Image (tube, grey):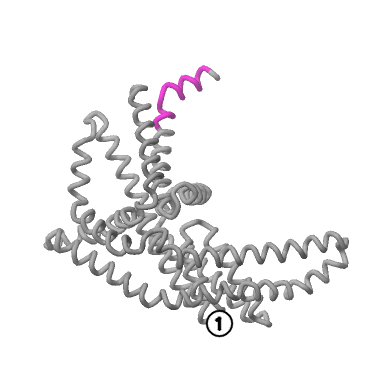
């Protein structure tokens, strides 16, 4: 590729990033609709092959999907709102209870630590525990209470189904149109990389989304059954952010055990809370992820965490949603570029000349 074309492509990517940054506040329903269409496209193709018209298949699928989503939200939102409000109100009591639970441990440490070090440890433990719980409570409360104002609940309810319907109906036509616009001399290469990106996204978006939903149900039900206060909201939150490797489960475990330590006076229920998280990890690692995601994603956990944090920092909640697909596509393109570099004269001749 000529240098001028390379710089043109870079300029185009920069302009696209700037446009997304400027419009991030209103892109949420369009991004959500696009992801829903991508998620449901295989089902629409299957119904179409069975003899159903594309428009009818899409209408039935989108209607069923959003009807199920609305029913689920109607059932869950009152419960979640109650638990979030109660959790925020109980944060100070949890902090005091954790300090009381840590008292015996600090007494044991007093025998081996200097007084000033013990005072610093006690102050740090209390402030960090309180800060973490308050941050988590504020985050969850802000999402459920202020998210509608930030994103626009009306636009999500009205625009997202429309975008999903039209994108899903015209998906194959859009793909053919884009394919026709490709320069003929690189069309084959672009198709190969697009197919690899599609396989990666299918594994993550479709597979990992299913894993997160199943884990949210498992953790929410499991923690509620063992009697953990606010176990439903902790479990659902843990499952939904499990797409970030280690971070989701780790955060849920810390919060769940923190509440358990403050709530229960014996170690039995605390062990049951830990057992729920351990069982969730076993189910995810040995059954859900191998069957639904497999080894096709090829995204390093650090890269996923960086992508999510960077997307959220730059574009808000919209950036969090597009972070993983963007990271997956970037990973495929980087691997392709490295493979081309290893076959190029720049790599082979440079290696020969240096030996």
Residue 41, visible in the rendered structure? no
Question: Between residues 145 and 7, which one lies in front from this camera angle?
Answer: 145
From the top left corner, tell me how far across and down residue 164 is, in percent: 26, 58
Q: Is residue 196 above or below residue 129?
A: above
Question: Between residues 101 and 41, which one lies in front from this camera angle?
Answer: 101
Question: Between residues 295 and 239, which one lies in front from this camera angle?
Answer: 239
Give the residue number, with chain letter if any, for mark 1: 227
Range drawn in magenta: 340-353
Question: Between residues 323 and 90, which one lies in front from this camera angle?
Answer: 90
**Viewed as shown, does residue 103 lie left or right of 348?**
right
Q: Main secondary structure of the magenta part?
A: helix
Residue 231, visible in the rendered structure? yes
**Viewed as shown, does residue 9 lie left or right of 308?**
left
Tell me where residue 209 sits by quadrant.
bottom left
**Viewed as shown, does residue 106 lie left or right of 11?**
right
Q: Is residue 323 above or below residue 289?
A: above
From the top left corner, tell me how far across and down residue 9 is, in percent: 35, 31
From the top left corner, tell me how far across and down residue 304 is, in percent: 48, 50
Q: Is residue 350 above or below residue 152?
A: above
Residue sitting farthest toward the top: 353
Q: Residue at x 51, y 17 (%)?
A: 353
From the top left corner, tell me how far across and down residue 239 is, in percent: 47, 66
Q: Secondary structure at mark 1?
A: loop
């Amino acid at each position: 590729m000529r240098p001028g074309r390379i710089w043109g492509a870079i300029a185009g990517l920069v302009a696209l990033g700037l446009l997304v940054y400027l419009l991030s506040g209103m892109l949420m329903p369009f991004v959500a609709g696009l992801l829903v269409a991508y998620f449901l496209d295989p089902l629409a193709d299957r119904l179409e092959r069975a003899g159903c018209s594309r428009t009818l298949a899409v209408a039935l699928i989108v209607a069923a999907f959003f009807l199920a989503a609305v029913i689920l939200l109607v059932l869950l939102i009152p419960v979640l709102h109650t638990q979030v409000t109660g959790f925020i109100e109980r944060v100070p009591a949890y902090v005091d209870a954790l300090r009381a639970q840590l008292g015996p441990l600090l007494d044991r440490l007093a025998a081996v630590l200097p007084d000033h070090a013990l005072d610093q440890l006690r102050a740090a433990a209390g402030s960090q525990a309180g800060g973490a719980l308050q941050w988590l409570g504020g985050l969850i409360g802000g999402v459920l209470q202020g998210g509608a104002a930030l994103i626009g609940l009306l636009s999500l309810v009205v625009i997202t189904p429309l975008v999903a319907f039209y994108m899903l109906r015209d998906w194959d036509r859009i793909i053919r149109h884009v394919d026709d616009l490709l320069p003929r001399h690189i069309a084959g290469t672009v198709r190969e990389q697009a197919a690899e990106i599609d396989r990666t996204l299918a594994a993550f978006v479709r597979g990992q989304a299913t894993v997160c939903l199943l884990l949210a149900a498992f953790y929410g039900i499991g923690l509620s059954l063992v009697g953990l206060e606010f176990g439903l909201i902790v479990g659902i939150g843990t499952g939904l952010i499990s797409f970030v490797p280690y971070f989701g489960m780790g955060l849920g475990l810390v919060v769940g055990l923190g509440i358990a330590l403050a709530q229960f006076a014996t170690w039995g229920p605390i062990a049951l809370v830990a057992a729920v998280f351990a069982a969730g990890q076993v189910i995810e690692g040995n059954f859900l992820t191998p069957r639904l995601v497999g080894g096709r994603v090829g995204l390093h956990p650090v890269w996923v965490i960086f992508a999510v944090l960077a997307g959220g920092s730059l574009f808000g909640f919209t950036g969090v949603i597009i972070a993983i697909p963007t990271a997956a596509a970037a990973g495929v393109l980087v691997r392709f570029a490295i493979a081309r570099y290893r076959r190029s004269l720049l790599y082979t001749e440079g290696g020969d000349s240096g030996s």
